[in-house]
Amino acid sequence: MKTTFFQLILLVFIISCTSKPVPPTINPQAYNQVVDGKQVKIFTLKNQKGMEITVTNFGGRIVSWLVPDKKGAMEDVVFGFDSINGYLGAKDTYFGAAVGRYGNRIAKGEFAIGDIQYKLAQNNGVNSLHGGVVGFSKKVWDVVQKSPAELNLKLVSPDMDEGFPGELNVDMTYRLTNENELIIQYEAKCDKPTVINLTNHSFFNLHGAGNGTILDHQLTINADYFTPIDSTLIPTGELAAVENTPFDFRNTTTIGSRINSDHQQIKYGLGYDINFVLKKNPDLGVQLAASVYEPQSGRLLEVFTDQPGIQFYTGNFLDGKNIGKKGKAYGYRTGLCLETQHFPNSPNQPKFPTVELTPDQVYTHTCIYKFSVR
């Protein structure tokens, strides 16, 4: 039996009516603004499977990330704003940002290289956090879109930028593969000894950004040890075993099951806000560090890296005052971060892996966020 032209039109209509709608992407005009004398724009990465990521060169931020669930329905799973004004008006959110020159905290905003002492802004209580008052997350990067699935971002941080010594030239690439991986590669060079610790600060909710808490997400972290902190969230310098603590995620564990535990480290962080010492095979480079699974949607996020640590944060300081995309409030424990990194306060902890960079060296860092369903 031959299919008539009318039947084909009817079939297309039925499919279009029953298929899952794809959420709208970010309006480019909402990011068309000059900040600190440089043009801010929005860029889109797409792969052959329909995954779509939008990035702004303001802070190298991942603004939106459309990810399918087990039924094929797409949902935006990262925190962000509908326009550049959201980032300019928000206080210290770091949503989706490329963080530097030093991601995480440096105690009392000071460190030494040799006999030279350096002083940084104390923008997080008595400590320095995420590169200072105007870190890389608030700078406008230069961007070249190499293909529909790849962006190259560059930034020159001058000598004594936010108190850090040496001119630092940073080259960062976002590449979206057809395996639904976002590969983030960092490379940096300096002209005098400095310290560096770059990372990405995306907040994830696998239900969809702004769609409830992340307490039902199931987490696995490949770590036998973590770095305990003091009351100001600075590592004490010791490595503590995760065994018999709320920080044992070697076997898949629901995040909310122990987040209110009567454990001093949990109390200091108001939940999870801690660096894990990744268990690594020295013969391999990039390795699986952590995974997060959300049973309702079936979305699985795997994180791979060549870095020694990963910061797990559960949005304990979010208060719902930041109104994100589609008018959704980002509230308490509605997003999680898995930031691949060197350890916090490493410049002041000689037993931690070094974060010093000299002019004869090249800093490199690879992080991969891979999505699938099960």
Image (spheres, helix red, strand yellow):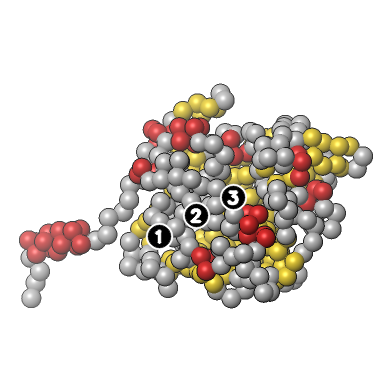
Helix, strand or loop under label 1: loop
Viewer-nearest of labels 2 and 1? 2
Residue 75 higher or lower than 116, as above or below:
below
Q: Which mark is residue 333?
A: 2
Check disc 1 and give the amino acid type.
His
Q: Nearer the viewer, mark 2 or mark 3?
A: 2
Drawn side of residue 191 relative to residue 316, left or right: right
Around disc 2, counting alpha carbons within 10 Å, would you say few (fewer than 14), some (14 to 19), or many (20 or more)? many
Q: Amino acid at mark 3?
A: Asn
From what the image shows, is residue 360 above or below residue 212? above
Residue drawn 15% across and 58% down? Answer: 13
The residue wearing badge 3 is 200
Which quarter of the image is occupied by the N terminus?
A: bottom left
Question: Percent x, y for residue 336?
Answer: 53, 56
Q: Is residue 219 visible?
A: no
User: Which quadrant holds the C terminus?
Assistant: bottom left
Asked if one can make out residue 153 in the rendered structure from this viewpoint, the answer is yes
Residue 77 on image: x %, y %: 43, 55
Measuring from the top left, give residue 106's x and y in whole percent.
74, 45
